Image: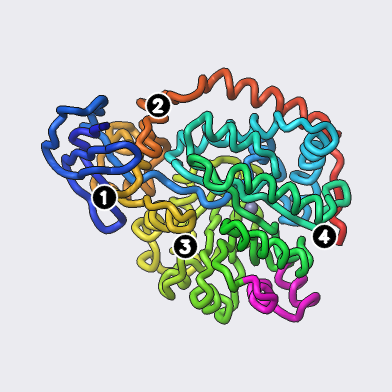
């Protein structure tokens, strides 16, 4: 048993905060929440005086290979950004993976991203990325919950990144069989976007998801360019198009949803589409501000994410919470329409629901995915409203518990030698990046 003793604030949920409270953990789950819980029988007691205890955060969408592409492409829109920033590096990754069977880079960026997220209080995440299982091994080593949403395409991207559909589906099935629901790790299916997959391929991916009961995540309506392209090709906006091919018959996580018609917002509600908000990424690429306040008022399921480090530059979800809330105030010219409680709910309960985790609240029976934040730091103190402080002033976690295990304590990661592992990962990333030769790869559209 693990006892978190006398936390100054315990954020049970977006609607309830307790003072000076203990939380007792038995195995992977919260056993009891209360005051003066007995220490007898506890192997570990954490003194949480002066600390704020919160459910762990869920980063519902990222691309960890982009951790090797930080600080690039500051003035590019999505299409040019893909061609100049992400495609050339993806090409090098694919060459090593497919031609040489070398997946060491997957472990390197998988670890780097997991460590960065852990420091920002993330206990679970969804990474839309290459089909390299070394990433899952890295997350196992770190002790974090990670879902690899295997990114699939069969058009639009440069020919260098193409694989025959049959081969792609075969490897996808192999990874699902080996890793779906293994320990804290999971595998999802991720057609990258409706415009990078033919409808026939989308249906094959959907059939595979149904066969294994895995979740589906896809990018939808990120840019105005994409809407125009969809209207020209299909006569429909992207989400309407997805419905027309039966792709919304299963619940999906739709990432971005910046440009939705009122009919599409209603579709989200009716077809159980979970919308994933990526405020910083959408801001950096000049894509727009998603209508999150409206979706929330309609009862649509919502989560929040950083997106990859090439369109955010950090995987610190505190920044996305903060900017995400503020951008909604700006979009609707109304500071009261969307705020700290709404965004906090998205990063905890919303994210947990999207990933199918029985977590996101500090209550007996829930999974023990918890973070402690030091209230005495100059960023935080003084605390007047714990949720507001966490959302608008938070920078990093002090201690992180995942599945009842202490993964970081007092800012020190307990599971892997961080400095050494990060150094190795960065060295390999720099070496591979040098092989991109700086030349852009054009999309085939
Ligand atoms: Zn993305």
Q: Residue at x 73, y 27 (%)?
A: 430
Residue 293 makes an appearance in the image: yes
Q: Quadrant of the C terminus?
A: bottom right
Q: Mark 1 and mark 3: span between their CA atoms?
A: 21 Å
Question: In the visual, does 133 lie left or right of 291?
Answer: right
Could you say where residue 307 lies in the image, as x and y percent from the top left? 59, 49
| Mark positioned earlier in the residue sequence (4 or 1) | 4
Q: Secondary structure at mark 4?
A: loop
**Marks 4 & 1, CB-CB < 8 Å contact:** no
Residue 311 makes an appearance in the image: no
Q: Residue at x 64, y 29 (%)?
A: 108
Q: Secondary structure at mark 1?
A: loop
Q: Which residue is mark 1?
A: 363
Q: Which residue is mark 2?
A: 411
Could you say where residue 196 lies in the image, as x and y percent from the top left? 77, 61
Question: In the visual, does 236 lie left or right of 184?
Answer: right
The color scheme shown is rainbow
Residue 67 sits above or below residue 75 on the image: above
**Marks 1 & 3, CB-CB < 8 Å contact:** no
Q: Which mark is residue 155?
A: 4
> Quadrant location of residue 245?
bottom right
| Mark positioned earlier in the residue sequence (3 or 4) | 4
Could you say where residue 356 lies in the image, as x and y percent from the top left? 46, 55
**Magenta stretch in the rendered image:** 226-247
């Amino acid at each position: 048993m693990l006892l978190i003793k006398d936390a100054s604030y315990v954020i049970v949920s977006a609607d309830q905060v307790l003072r000076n409270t203990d939380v007792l953990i038995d195995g992977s789950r919260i056993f009891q929440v209360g005051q003066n819980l007995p220490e007898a029988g506890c192997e570990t007691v954490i003194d949480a005086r002066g600390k704020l205890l919160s459910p762990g955060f869920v980063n519902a969408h990222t691309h960890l290979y982009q951790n090797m592409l930080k600080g690039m492409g500051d003035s590019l829109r999505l299409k040019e950004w893909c061609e100049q920033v992400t495609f050339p590096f993806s090409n090098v990754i694919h060459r090593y993976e497919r031609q040489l069977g070398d997946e060491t880079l997957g472990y390197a960026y998988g670890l780097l991203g997991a460590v960065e997220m852990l420091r920002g209080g993330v206990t679970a995440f969804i990474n839309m990325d290459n089909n390299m299982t070394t990433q899952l091994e890295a997350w196992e080593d770190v002790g974090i919950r990670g879902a690899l949403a295997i990114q699939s395409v069969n058009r639009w991207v440069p020919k260098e990144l193409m694989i025959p559909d049959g081969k792609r589906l075969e490897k996808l099935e192999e990874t699902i069989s080996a890793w779906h629901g293994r320990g804290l790790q999971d595998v999802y299916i991720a057609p990258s976007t409706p415009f990078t997959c033919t409808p026939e391929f989308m249906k094959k991916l959907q059939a595979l998801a149904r066969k294994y009961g895995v979740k589906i995540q896809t990018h939808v309506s990120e840019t105005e360019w994409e809407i125009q392209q969809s209207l020209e090709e299909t006569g429909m906006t992207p989400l309407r198009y997805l419905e027309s091919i039966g792709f919304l018959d299963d619940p999906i996580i739709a990432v971005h949803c910046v440009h939705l018609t009122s009919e599409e917002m209603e579709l989200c509600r009716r077809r159980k589409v979970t919308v994933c908000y990526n405020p910083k990424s959408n801001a950096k690429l000049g894509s727009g501000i998603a209508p999150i306040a409206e979706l929330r008022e309609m009862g649509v399921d919502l989560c929040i994410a950083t997106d990859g480090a090439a369109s955010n530059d950090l995987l610190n979800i505190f920044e996305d919470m903060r900017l995400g809330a503020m951008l909604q105030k700006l979009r609707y010219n109304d500071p009261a329409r969307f705020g700290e409680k709404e965004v906090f709910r998205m990063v905890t309960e919303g994210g947990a629901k999207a990933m199918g985790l029985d977590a996101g609240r500090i209550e007996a029976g829930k999974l023990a995915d918890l973070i402690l934040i030091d209230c005495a730091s100059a960023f935080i103190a003084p605390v007047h409203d714990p949720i507001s402080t966490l959302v608008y002033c938070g920078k990093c976690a002090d201690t992180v518990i995942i599945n009842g295990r202490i993964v970081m304590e007092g800012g020190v990661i307990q599971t892997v030698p961080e400095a050494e592992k990060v150094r190795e990962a960065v060295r390999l990333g720099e070496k591979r990046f040098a092989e991109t030769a700086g030349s852009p790869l054009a999309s085939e559209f």
